[in-house]
Image (cartoon, rainbow, N blue to C red):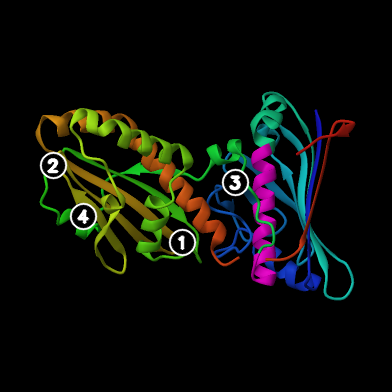
Amino acid sequence: MPVRNVHERVLPVPAAVAGALLDRLASPGDPLWPSPPWPRLRFDRPLGVGATGGHGPIRYRVTRYTPGRLIECAFDPATGCHGTHAFEVEPLGAGRCVLRHRLTARTTGAMRLLWPLAIRVCHDTLLEHLLDNAERATTGAVRRPVRYPLRARLAAPAVRAVRVPPGAHLLHAWPGRRDLADAYAVHVPPGVPADPQAWADAVFRDPPRPVALLLGLRNLLAPLVGVARADATAFATLARTDREVLLGTDAAHLGFRAGVLVTPGATGATVTVSTVAAARGRAGRAYLAVVRLVHPAVVRAMLRRAARTTVRSAGQPAGTITVRADTGDGPAAL
């Protein structure tokens, strides 16, 4: 099945400015590629003809490279795509240019179904996020940030289960019993705020809507089983350092602590949310037995949303968006 997909953004800067950003693709501190929430773009060598790599399972090789103007890649046929995708910068006169991405390919095998069902919406969202980053880098803000549709939200970012990190000193100092102990982490790129309190607020004070509804249901049912309702103090900050924040509360049925640890690295930072809890009495043990069933999904969803919104809002406005796409012989809403 033939696919043609085009995303472009008019930027109020000379082509040389946008081209300089394009030349930094896949390099340390790449200002364009949105990672997270998407897998990092990597090549096996510096950007140039012959460099091989890709993002996630999508693999390709650089076939043409004109510094500041063009990067063209040919897909590895094993991906089910036969064709190319390319970034290009086109001058529009003094002080304006277009940054464009073109995908022209023929899909085969499983990709014939995967493209329209799942990959296209992720591709479109990733490219609009990348163009937002270009707009932000050249103007300081984004006029109309991309909205993540449901299928794209489900695809990213990558939150993984980990051990409670040894560096979570505030959390380890809590003397409570460990009836529950787990941790989840996400990697964020350079330039994203590293303040652990900002991350704690993003995770616990702005949950996804399904999580907020679940917490509301919990408060409705809690008194029926002898458990106190939760309020804003449940996630009060109890202690903090430059890298870690400790939150939590002590109730009659349960004591818990949540730690948010930000660990800097050469390619960004790792944000880890760890939870420990101690049940108290029969009501607490029954409550914790239920919490265990939903806790991993809830924490993953909260951390994933925090990562997505924090990365997208890190440094942010201007430009016009034009999206055009064709699949086969007719237009398609991509």
Q: Name the residue beneath numbered marker 3.
A: 55
The CA span between labels 3 and 4 is 35 Å
Of the pair 190 and 290, the residue shown nearer to us: 290
Q: Name the residue beneath numbered marker 2.
A: 252
Asked if the residue under mark 2 is in contact with the one under mark 3, i.e. CB atoms within 8 Å, the reply is no
The CA span between labels 3 and 2 is 49 Å
For badge 2, the amino acid type reads Ala
Q: Earlier in the sequence, mark 4 or mark 2?
A: 4
For badge 4, the amino acid type reads Leu
For badge 3, the amino acid type reads His
Q: Is residue 23 visible?
A: no
Asked if the residue under mark 2 is in contact with the one under mark 1, i.e. CB atoms within 8 Å, the reply is no
Asked if the residue under mark 3 is in contact with the one under mark 1, i.e. CB atoms within 8 Å, the reply is no
Of the pair 11 and 68, the residue shown nearer to us: 11
Asked if the residue under mark 1 is in contact with the one under mark 4, i.e. CB atoms within 8 Å, the reply is no
Q: Find numbered disc 1 in the image and state the secondary structure of the residue it sits on.
A: strand
Q: Which residues are magenta?
A: 121-141
Q: Name the residue beneath numbered marker 1.
A: 268
Quarter containing the N terminus:
top right
187, above or below 242, in the image? above
Q: Find numbered disc 2 in the image and state the secondary structure of the residue it sits on.
A: loop
Tag nearer the camera, 4 or 2:
2
